[in-house]
């Protein structure tokens, strides 16, 4: 897969089984140096073999568990087409991989849970958006993040206005048809609702029906996702689509430009700017809420308390620097926590554990920098109670 989304991170967080293997590595996208990718992966497999062997696992079981990784290692075309980083998750009889646009540090982990801390940036609320591009030629729907954007199949939606005109009323299609060869500008006039045959009122009604058709298909595809929808198109089109829209999470901000004049990377850049400006406002409000609630005992930057409260499902919002490393363990029998700066035998990564528990209890997660909080802490939490 070329991306990872919240629901997939949730699935990984829920896994609990012996010998779950988590592998992360940076990757080379193209060129002769792509040969390094398979070499890195082979070395990670070797580390996992050593971990399993040191745990007393028999060679036969190790080979069976790691067979999917060997098959992937031998897939030469796979290694020639990578993103910036690769995350691989292996359990008995199954392997999942994600080619992701960030350079991971090399990690080889074997545990009863997947190691998911490197995925924290992908759980941030600013990562996901839908972009609906409404154009005279073609209407397109994308699912994107700050890192990348990929197109979603429109299914059976008639997303070309000329096709919709012909489908709805062939005679009216002749009346309103704008032509392409002699007067290219006239096609956009249909979208603007001015000056091309027929009555303006009829044309506006027709465009509204066209937008309602698009809305029915789009809303059906993304229903219940709670991901913000951004519209791209000329101002008049956006105005009409808003009348037809039934998706509750459509944003007021839009890309008011002619999509036919824009490349996909431009559309992505504008969409990311909109979502990040919006999320920055939300983030600033979250930091303000954290500071306000400290005096009421409903927010904390004490790691031991955060660990305990995460297991109790008390964390509403986790603020965390993904590069923070703290090790130790949580004892549910006496609700105690041990914390170490350096990993000792039997320790787990406490940041990974807190992130997992926050995900499992439907909490929110914000990435912070080392100097974000006045206290200088690199992990903090707003509590539900």
Image (cartoon, rainbow, N blue to C red):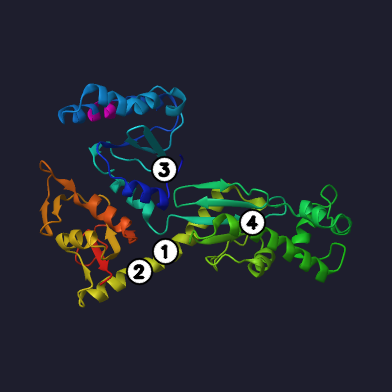
Q: Local crowd at mark 3 within 10 Å, few (<14), some, or many (≥20)?
A: some
Tell me which numbered mark, 2 or 3, is placed earlier along the sequence. 3
Label 2 sits on residue:
284
Picture quarter with the N terminus: top left
Please provide the residue range marked out in magenta: 43-48
Above/below status of 130 relative to 58: below
- Mark nearer the N terminus (2 vs 1): 1
Distance of label 2 from label 4 (alpha carbons): 35 Å
Where disc 3 sits, the SS reads loop
Of callouts 2 and 4, which one flags the residue occurring earlier in the amino acid sequence? 4
The mark lying in front, picked from 4 and 3, is 4
- The residue tagged with tag 2: helix, strand or loop? helix
Q: What residue is rendered at 73% in x and 60% in y? A: 210
Total labels: the figure holds: 4
How far from the left and from the top, in percent, is residue 277?
A: 45, 64
Within 10 angstroms of label 1, few (less than 14), some, or many (20 or more) residues? some
Q: Which label lies toward us, 4 or 1?
A: 4
Where on the picture, by quarter, is residue 85? top left
Compared with residue 292, is residue 203 higher up or lower down, i.e. above or below?
above
Q: Residue at x 15, y 60 (%)?
A: 304
Label drawn at residue 279: 1
Q: Is residue 321 visible?
A: no
Q: Nearer the viewer, mark 2 or mark 4?
A: 4
Which residue carries the number 3 mark? 101
Dot 1 falls on a residue whose secondary structure is helix
Q: Which residue is mark 4?
A: 217
Above or below residue 182? Residue 76 is above
Provide residue 110's location: percent of width, then percent of height. 24, 37
Which secondary structure, mark 4? helix
Mark 1 or mark 3: which comes first in sequence?
3
């Amino acid at each position: 897969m070329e991306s990872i989304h919240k629901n997939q991170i949730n699935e990984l967080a829920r896994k609990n089984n012996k010998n779950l293997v988590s592998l992360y590595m940076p990757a080379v996208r193209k060129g002769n140096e792509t040969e390094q990718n398979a070499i890195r992966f082979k070395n990670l497999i070797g580390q996992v073999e050593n971990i399993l062997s040191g745990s007393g696992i028999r060679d036969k079981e190790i080979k069976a568990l790691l067979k999917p990784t060997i098959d992937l290692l031998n897939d030469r075309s796979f290694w020639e087409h990578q993103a910036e980083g690769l995350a691989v998750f292996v359990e008995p009889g199954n392997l999942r991989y994600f080619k992701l646009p960030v350079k991971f540090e090399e990690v080889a982990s074997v545990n009863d849970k997947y190691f998911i801390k490197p995925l924290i940036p992908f759980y941030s609320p600013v990562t996901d958006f839908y972009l609906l591009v409404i154009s005279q030629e073609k209407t397109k729907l994308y699912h994107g993040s700050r890192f990348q954007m990929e197109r979603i199949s429109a299914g059976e939606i008639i997303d070309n206005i000329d096709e919709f005109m012909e489908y709805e009323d062939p005679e009216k299609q002749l009346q309103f048809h704008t032509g392409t060869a002699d007067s290219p500008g006239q096609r956009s006039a249909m979208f603007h609702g001015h000056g091309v045959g027929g009555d303006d009122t009829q044309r506006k009604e027709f465009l509204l029906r066209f937008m309602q058709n698009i809305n029915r298909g789009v809303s059906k595809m993304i229903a219940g996702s709670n991901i913000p929808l951004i519209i791209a198109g000329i101002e008049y089109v956006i105005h009409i689509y808003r009348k037809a829209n039934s998706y509750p999470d459509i944003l007021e901000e839009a890309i008011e430009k002619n999509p036919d004049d824009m490349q996909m990377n431009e559309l992505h850049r504008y969409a990311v700017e909109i979502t990040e400006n919006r999320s920055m406002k939300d983030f600033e409000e979250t930091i303000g809420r954290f500071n306000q609630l400290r005096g009421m005992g409903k927010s904390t930057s004490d790691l031991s308390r955060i660990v305990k409260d995460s297991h109790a499902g008390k964390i509403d919002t986790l603020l965390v620097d993904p590069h923070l490393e703290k090790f130790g363990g949580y004892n549910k029998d006496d609700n105690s926590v041990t914390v170490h700066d350096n990993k000792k035998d039997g320790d787990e990564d406490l940041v990974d554990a807190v992130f997992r528990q926050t995900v499992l209890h439907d909490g929110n997660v914000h990435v912070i920098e080392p100097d974000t909080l006045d206290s200088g802490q690199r992990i903090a939490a707003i509590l539900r109670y």
